Image (cartoon, rainbow, N blue to C red):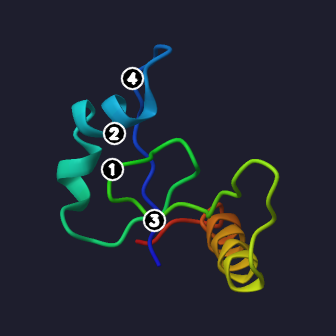
Amino acid sequence: MCPAFGLGEGTARNDCKAWEESGDKAAVGKTMTIADGGYPGTGLVMPHRRRAGEGLPEWMQEHNRSHRQVRAASSAPSCA
C-alpha cells in the first residue's frame, strides 16, 4: 500500500470537483483508491452509508471496519 495525498485546492471546494481538477484523479489512473464519504459518484471506494431509519447489514459494517483500518494505516510513513 502506498498512500497518496493530494495538495488540495486550498479553498472550500466540493471534494468531487477538487478530486478531478487537482489532477489527483489523473495521477491514480485506474488504481483502486479509497476515500472518505465525500466522493460519491467518482468511482472511489467509500464506506457504506445507512439509509435514514435503517441500520447497516453486518457485511457492510465489516467492509466499513476494514475501510477504517486501511485509512488509518495510510497515516503511516509513505512508500519510497
User: Which of marks 3 and 4 precedes in the sequence?
Assistant: 4
On the image, numbered disc 2 is attached to which residue?
19
Earlier residue among tags 2 and 4: 4
- Above or below, 69 relative to 38: below
Disc 2 to disc 4, C-alpha distance? 9 Å
Q: Amino acid at mark 1?
A: Thr
Residue shown at the point (62%, 64%) measured from the top left = 48
Label 1 – label 4 distance at C-alpha = 17 Å
Q: Give the distance between the C-alpha atoms of the residues marked 4 and 3, in whole angstroms.
A: 21 Å
Would residue 20 appear left or right of 46 to someone viewing this image? left
Q: What is the count of numbered marks?
A: 4
The amino acid type of the residue labelled 2 equals Trp
Indicate which label's residue lies in the foreground, 2 or 1: 1
Q: What residue is disc 1 on?
A: 42
Q: Position of residue 78 (x, y in %)?
A: 51, 65
- Kind of residue at badge 4: Glu
Mark 1 → mark 3, Cα distance in angstroms? 9 Å
Judged from the image, the secondary structure of the residue bearing numbered disc 2 is helix
Circle 3 residue: 45
Mark toward the viewer: 4 or 3: 3
Q: SS of the residue at dot 3? A: loop
**Which of the image's four quarters has the C terminus?**
bottom left
**Among numbered discs 2 and 1, the one appearing first in the sequence:** 2
The answer to which image quadrant residue 63 occupies is: bottom right
Residue reaching furthest to the top = 11
- The foreground one among 41 and 34 is 41
Name the residue beneath numbered marker 4. 9
- Label 2 with label 1: CB-CB less than 8 Å: yes
